[in-house]
Amino acid sequence: MNALIENLKGKLIVSVQAYPGEPLRNPETMAQMARACEIGGAAAIRCQGIADIAAIKGRVEIPVIGLWKDGHEGVYITPTLRHARACVAAGADIVAFDATDRPRPDGRTVADTLEPLKAEGVFTMADCMTIDDIRRAAELGFDLVSTTLSHGVAAVDCTMADGPDLPLLRQAVSEFPDLPIICEGRVHTPAEAAEAIDAGAWAVVVGTAITHPTSLTSWFTDALA
């Protein structure tokens, strides 16, 4: 196993992203936030958009997991091979993309997208929704597999009451004990992150609970209301 992947084992990956229309949606702001997370102990940064990837790559020394969100429905996380290659060109050490079997804008399958990237030596992360997606990703040879899409909604829509999909994580780890499986989605507390590692996660991605002050503030205001 490559050292880059090996070094993520048991560690925290922080998702540094801002949503359209938000005050923090600026590459320099995202780069500053990523550097702050690195100082706090993050082992890698997950980020989206060509400008953010480039800015963050120039600011941190830890690996950058890059993706490109294009649209809001269906396959929109790095939906085409063109998007994936652009992430690589921007500096991503690992490219994350939707690994479901849903139709893609360029008509390619997951395998069609992955094959040339593997040939080009690109490390890849499969964003999965179901155990079938994880099985497909394992068979195809993704370097990392994640539960990113199992909650079915955008991270900003995940309330504090929601938790990570540990049942899916445990099933995946049971079927593929040697595959680096990442727990991502709805991890809102340190205790939940630790629970995911105990359940067998290779690493844990936390985004909203660390890097999205709008959601954090709303959790407190909602509790007071």
Image (cartoon, rainbow, N blue to C red):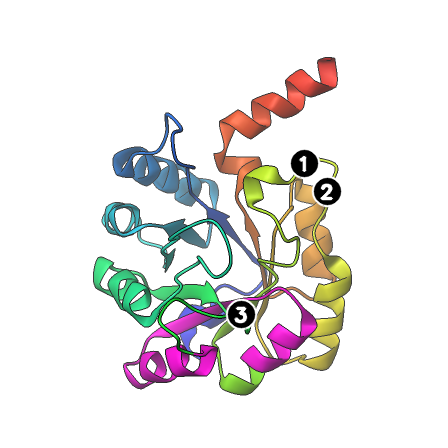
Indicate whether 195 appears above or below 182. above
Q: Are marks 2 and 3 in contact (CB under 8 Å)?
A: no
Q: CA distance from mark 2 to mark 1?
A: 6 Å
Q: Sort mark 1 into few (<14), some (14-19) or many (20+) by Cα contacts within 10 Å.
A: some
Indicate whether 145 appears above or below 138. above
- Most extreme residue toward the right is 167
Q: Which element is circle 3 on?
A: loop
Indicate whether 90 appears above or below 24. below
Q: Amino acid at mark 2?
A: Asp
What is the quadrant of the C terminus in the image? Answer: top right
Task: Give residue 172's position: percent from left, percent from top.
Answer: 70, 73
Task: Give residue 78's position: percent from left, percent from top.
Answer: 39, 61
Q: Residue at x 39, y 75 (%)?
A: 107
Q: Is residue 133 magenta?
A: yes
Q: Sort mark 3 into few (<14), some (14-19) or many (20+) by Cα contacts within 10 Å.
A: few
Q: Is residue 195 left or right of residue 211?
A: right
Q: Is residue 224 left or right of residue 36?
A: right
Q: Residue at x 56, y 44 (%)?
A: 155
Res 102 label = 3
Q: Is residue 162 left or right of residue 118?
A: right
Q: Of label 3 and label 1, which has the lower sequence position?
A: 3
Task: Give residue 176's position: percent from left, percent from top.
Answer: 67, 80
Magenta residues (range) = 109-137
Q: Of label 2 and label 3, which has the lower sequence position?
A: 3
Residue beneath disc 2 = 162
Q: Amino acid at mark 3?
A: Arg
Res 159 label = 1
Q: Are marks 3 and 1 in contact (CB under 8 Å)?
A: no
Q: Residue at x 50, y 63 (%)?
A: 8
